[in-house]
Image: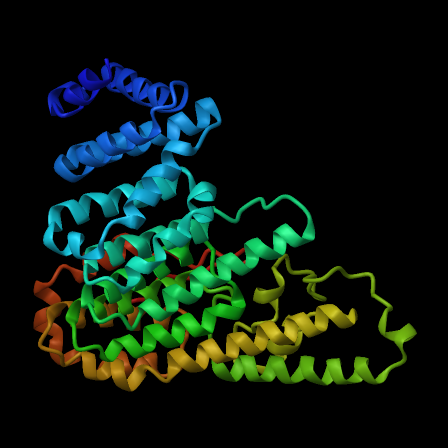
Amino acid sequence: MHRCTYVLFENQNVLKDEETRNGLCRIIGAIATRHQKISQTSASVLHLIHKYDFTVAHLAEAVAAAEKKFGDGSLAISLIREIGRTDPKDYVRDGAGADNVGRFLVELADRLPKLMSTNLGVLIPHFGGESYKIRNSLVGVLGKLAAKAFKDVDGNNSAHSIRLRSKQAMLEILIERCRDVSAYTRSRVLQVWAELCEENAISIGLWNEVASVASGRLEDKSAIVRKSALQLLITMLQHNPFGPQLRATTFEATLEKYKEKLEEKESQSPAEGELVNDHPLGEVTVGQDESVSDSCLPSSQDQTDEDHMFVDITNLEQIRALVASLEAGLRFTTCITSLMPILIQLLASSSATDVENTILLLMRCRQFQVEGSEAALRKMLPLRYFLRTSQYMKQWRAHSLPYTQKGSQQKQPKV
């Protein structure tokens, strides 16, 4: 039975039938867990992964199903450790096998994020290996874990602190991998950061560091890295936590008001500083239904509008948090504004992907009223023939969505 199962798994036509495939997966899980054939099953599964690429997703599902059904993750742990113990040079010699193993790890991290996070240490040494395919897959694993493994954290404060430190360590590795020697890995890391942006898995404290890394990669020597960096910045603008308008002058004016309010509160006695008004955090004095981050960002340069959008907050801790958020928003806005000279240079690039993605980023900047974006967009007027013949306009209209933060409605930019 044991041998017959793996022989059937080698037949792609057999695996196309869902009922048969599920039955084979259950047999593999039962043999490994209930009958304690962990080492034999691990060897057979790894053989299938290395040799047959169409088995990767199905085997990951079989391993995850065994853990969920029998409450025993020993098969998954055994496979992770066997992959970790493999000599990195073997993956250089076997490119196809490295691809399959990498895909298996990403699939397993997607299905069993918490188990993978606790056994990740045996895989980390492969970041020092020569196979960029394995490094790419490990970057994908870290992205899956950062997005999924630390949600709904239960337990005492000590366990919670350990998990937070583990997540921070993973994110630091992703930052470091942006300087990998392989352009494919650098590009993959930037793509993972974009996925984390969409999952809202990047904290405000780390937001500007990621934006700075992406900005630096705009001058990368590889076109695929520049493309991923441009797309990451587009995603960061779309999902930014600071509001639908990113004008530096507006942030500076609002920040100055709250700093004055904070200094005033800190100079008061503790008893006075603890008093809180009747308005909850984020309630606008003019009665607008907006979130704090939206309401403290004026939608006009007019001073009267700025006064109307000012949020009346008297709680000291809330004011401190809001000041820190505004400072982070100002840094992000300043970072994006400083990119305009580089983006103008990319408009003259010999790479079509550079030009197309730069235009998309500039249009996104214009949508968020980033200073200097209007002038930079005028630089593409000599490219009007290119604009007529390329497909980027259709892509923009198909994929450009208004800013989705609560309380904001942003119109699409006119071209």
Q: In this view, does 392 lie to the left or right of 79?
A: left
Depth check: give the residue in front, 249 or 229.
229
Give the position of the C terminus as an image quadrant. Answer: bottom left
Q: In this view, does 58 lie to the left or right of 355?
A: right
On the image, the x and y values in percent for residue 344 come to 23, 83
Depth check: give the residue in front, 389 or 51.
51
For the point 59% across and 72% down, which residue is it?
Answer: 325
* Circle count: 0
Give the position of the N terminus as an image quadrant. Answer: top left
Please identify the quarter of the rendering in which residue 272 is found: bottom right
Please identify the quarter of the rendering in which residue 253 is found: bottom right
Depth check: give the residue in front, 336 or 160.
160
Colour option used: rainbow
On the image, the x and y values in percent for residue 95 come to 12, 51
Depth check: give the residue in front, 81 or 58.
81
On the image, the x and y values in percent for residue 64 come to 38, 31
For the point 25% across and 57% down, which residue is it?
Answer: 136
For residue 239, above or below residue 109:
below
Whether residue 133 is visible, yes or no, is: yes
Whether residue 364 is visible, yes or no, is: no
For the point 31% across and 64% down, which residue is it?
Answer: 190
Q: Is residue 363 left or right of residue 202?
A: left
Please identify the quarter of the rendering in which residue 362 is found: bottom left
For the point 33% across and 77% down, which residue is it?
Answer: 215
On the image, the x and y values in percent for residue 18 come to 25, 18
